[in-house]
Amino acid sequence: MADGLSLYEQDFVRWSEEQAHALRAAGISGTNLPLDWDNLAEKIDGLGRSLRSELRNRLATIIEHLLKLGVSTAADPRGGWVETVMRERIEVESLLDESPSLRASLPDSLDRAERKARKLAEVSLPRHGEWSPAASRRFGETRFSNSDVLGPWLPDAVGSDRS
């Protein structure tokens, strides 16, 4: 490993996948160790899956708040939404640094996160009086690139562009 780091230290998700595979193979080989190979492998696999789920949830939070920033005309919640976006971006970068193999799943994670975020924002905005025909139109037209979600861009106000 580079710099003497183990795979466990470099990429936990990949390590968990490899360890789960190794446990299953060891279980099949008929070793006489009294271990519950299948459940051990499943638990280790689950650790990696939970990090993927955490990534999707954090991405969904970013996208939900970007949607609110882009659609809502309310002034008061904007600061909180911006803080949430910034905090979640930092957490996503930490996850990706700790498990670089998660980067390969970003396109799928972003797609799934956007579907979830749209549902959440679509419920939240009307409950706070932020839904109108114009807001509905803006909501339907608003799309974000990967760099919009993960980069520094923030909507300044309703209808802001990405320049």
Image: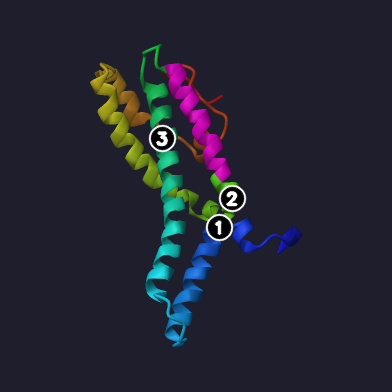
Name the secondary structure under disc 3. helix
Position of 22 compared to 6: left or right? left
Mark 1–mark 2 CB contact (< 8 Å)? yes
Q: Which residue is mark 3?
A: 61
* Callout count: 3
The residue that disc 1 covers is: 12
Rendered image quadrant of residue 121: top left
Q: Which residue is mark 2?
A: 98
Q: Is residue 147 visible?
A: no
Residue located farthest toward the front when viewing the structure as drawn = 34
Q: Is residue 82 magenta?
A: yes
Identify the residue shown where x is 42% and y is 57%.
Answer: 49
User: Can you give x and y, in whole percent of width and height, for residue 135 in the image?
Assistant: 30, 21
Measure how far apart labels 3 and 1 are at the Cα level: 23 Å
Distance Cα–Cα, label 2 vs label 3: 20 Å
As drawn, 134 above or below 104: above
